[in-house]
Image: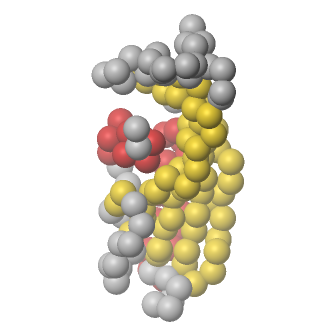
Amino acid sequence: MIASEFIYDNIIIDLELTHPIYLGAGVNINTSYMHVMDVGNVANPAYIRDTYTIKFYGYFERGSYDDGLKDFYKIKDGLLGHPNIIDEDGNIWCRFLQMQGPTFLGNDDKGRSIFTMEFEITVDGNNSTYRKTIQ
């Protein structure tokens, strides 16, 4: 299960963002863009409840600064309070919690402003060898 991909496919893709957003790191683009990547996972040892941490990064040229920051707030509004999503395997994606950001990190070597924002997303699963379901 790749949390960033699930969030992208089920929530982010429906948002009207000004800049393109990509999955994973290593994007090498000279213009303004965003990307989202997985940065952590915490699992409950007794129950099938995993919490994934995903992080959004934005690299915005001087003329795109305002629109870039607006994109971050669109993502924030799209995730916070989002209703639970049940995936094709019966897992329940819930608890969309903002942990940090949007935070300005500085400028890259191309002079773009870099922003970041981090979320935790909890997934209640229904299939495990040793752990029990929460429901």
One can see residue 73 in this view: no
Say if 70 sits above or below 11 in the image.
Answer: below
Is residue 111 visible in the rendered image? The answer is yes
Instruction: Give the vertical position of 23 relative to 74 (above or below).
Output: below
- Which of the pair 55/135 is nearer the observer? 135
Residue at image position (68%, 48%) is 99
Classify the position of the C terminus by image quarter: top right
* Total numbered badges shown on the rendered structure: 0
**Residue 88 place in picture, x, y as percent:** 31, 22
Taking depth in this image into account, of 17 and 101 the one nearest to the observer is: 101
Seen at 53% across and 50% down, the residue is 54
Outermost residue, top side: 135
Q: Is residue 6 above or below residue 108?
A: above
Specify whether 70 is left or right of 99.
Answer: left
Q: Quadrant of residue 80?
A: top right
The image position of residue 32, as x and y in percent, is 39, 74
Q: Residue at x 62, y 34 (%)?
A: 43
Horizontal and vertical percent for residue 16? Answer: 35, 49
Q: Report the quarter where the N terminus lies.
A: top left
> What is the basis of the colouring in this image?
secondary structure
Estimate the x, y position of residue 5 in percent, counting from the top left.
37, 46
- Horizontal arrangement in the rendering, residue 89 relative to residue 100 (left or right): left
Viewer-proximal residue among 35 and 67: 35
Q: Which residue lies at the image location 58% right of the left edge and 63% below the top edge?
A: 116
